[in-house]
Amino acid sequence: MKILPLSEGTFTIDQSKVFIPFDPQKDQLQERSRGSLLVEIQPFLVVTEKDLILFDSGLGYTNNGVMQIIENLASHGFASTDVTKVLMSHLHRDHAGGLIIQDTFSKSPFLTFPNAQHYINFRELEYAQSGKSTSYDQQYFSYLSHHEKVILIDEKGCIDDYITYEISSGHSVFHQVFWLRENDEIIFFGGDEAPQLQQMKTRFVAKYDADGKKAMELRKHWWELGEKERWTFLFYHDIKTPTIKL
């Protein structure tokens, strides 16, 4: 399997939940609003023997009207129409913002990856639409819930005999994680419950997690199992160390 990190760059976010581009070479965090946090955003494309799989869709950030993730795919020789599967850990705006494009003229929404099957936890989608959390942008969720290319999944299961998933519920209430198994290789995507290499090596409870203690224990469990089975981890919020094979 071939792993292609699709970094959208670094952003700051504060209580407004607005993501603002941040250039570490020029910008100063102290000049941003009080309490601003740095967030690196990095979806992944994994090329398997039969699929082009996208893990989460990014923020949906655009450069001159073109979505960053589309430019990133093009830099590797792929178009958005080439993606065959989109696997979503959860629907917070920094992970799901790239799922939908709005037509410039009709203002109608359409899928950014129109030929891909989109795998979304159905309870995560319901919760995202409920308005109970400001971490979700509800604008297009009703469109997703009725689209023929969206496959709503729950709890745990297997896709095409080589992709497994299970609900983990650490970062968001209905967060889910994925494994790809092909030719004795195992790739693990833990979304925001395994977002950075450093977080896998330290034990702490994050305030931004729905269940911080559970997320901490899951990281420990996955790291230990990954060492035993030699997993390759994909880190969505770690541009400096996007992947590591144990």
Image (spheres, rainbow, N blue to C red):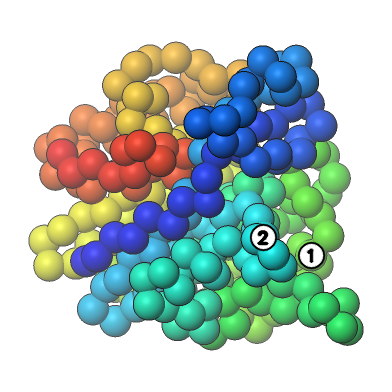
Task: Decide: is 157 above or below 213.
Answer: below
Separation (CA) of disc 1 from disc 2: 17 Å
Where on the picture, by quarter, is residue 98? bottom right
Task: Decide: is 223 above or below 242.
Answer: above
In the rendered image, residue 181, in percent from the top left (x then y), is placed at 23, 62
Task: Decide: is 126 above or below 228.
Answer: below
Q: Tag 2: Cα neighbours inside 10 Å, few (<14), some, or many (≥20)?
A: some
For mark 2, what is the residue? Answer: 62
Q: Is residue 166 visible?
A: no
In the rendered image, residue 91, in percent from the top left (x then y), is placed at 64, 52
Residue name at image x 15 percent, y 39 percent? 246
Residue 140: give its label.
Answer: 1
In the rendered image, residue 233, in percent from the top left (x then y), is placed at 29, 44
Left or right, 46 with respect to 136, comes to left
Q: Amino acid at mark 2?
A: Thr
Instruction: Out of 246 and 229, give the one closest to the viewer.
Output: 246
Residue name at image x 78 percent, y 26 percent? 15
In what element is the residue under mark 2? strand
Residue name at image x 63 percent, y 65 percent? 67
